[in-house]
Image (tube, rainbow, N blue to C red):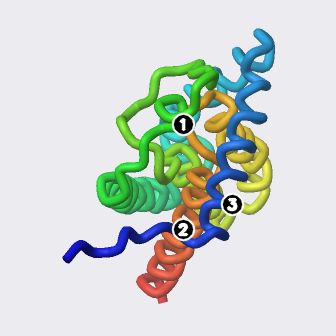
Amino acid sequence: MSQPVSTPPERWLKLLSLDGRLCHRLNQISQREGPGRFFAAVSRLGDGSFWYLLLLFLPLVQGRYGLLVSMHLALTGVCSLLVYRWVKQSTSRLRPFHEMPGLIRREPPLDEYSFPSGHTLHAVAFTLVLASHLPLLGWLVLPFTVLVAISRPVLGLHYPSDVLAGAVIGAVIAILTITGARWLLL
């Protein structure tokens, strides 16, 4: 006796369709040379170099307090990396350029799978931790974080839902490390 094949609920299929259409529309931005180069550069900075420079810069400008903030950011980065890798391997969602004909991939991916966006996860986590210590600097970094998030579907590397999930996971990790840091300092 064969088991009935389970199909996703219609709402889920509609969300996936919307995700694909939005991804395709955002990816069209990268087909123009100027915006394509701009978002590729933003994405490359979001690979880590921007955040590494910030980690080195803070102690030079803020002294001991900057060193503590950099240590908090580094701890947040390690936690984010562990969660990101676990979720990515658990879900194994293919990248949109593998599944959607006509999508242009402007940059090579750092790894195989799409869900969640690690760039967005890390950028949101770092921005929130930074804002908890140095609010003005957090506000200054926020536009970069938003651009990193937008760059991922524009470049054909992520679906918008990957970016949203990365932002939510990054925010949760930031809240947990901020709460943990405050608890340790009490």
Query: Label 1 to label 3, Cα distance in Å?
Result: 17 Å
- Secondary structure at numbered mark 2: helix
Front position among marks 2 and 1: 1
Q: Amino acid at mark 2?
A: Ala
Residue 96 is marked as: 1
Camera-side mark, 1 or 3: 3
Residue 130 in view in this figure: no
Residue hosting label 3: 14
Q: Residue at x 71, y 29 (%)?
A: 27
Q: Give the quarter of the image for residue 31.
A: top right
SS class, disc 1: helix
Disc with the residue nearer the chain's start (2 vs 1) = 1
Rendered location of residue 129, percent (x, y):
59, 63
Q: Mark 3 or mark 2: which comes first in sequence? A: 3
Residue 96 spot, x, y in % from top left: 54, 37
Q: Nearer the viewer, residue 66 or 91?
A: 91
Up-down relation of residue 178 to residue 94 (above or below): below
| Whether residue 139 is situated above or below residue 12 in the rendered picture | above
At which x and y percent is residue 53?
A: 53, 34
Tell me whether circle 3 and circle 2 mark residues in contact (CB < 8 Å). Answer: no
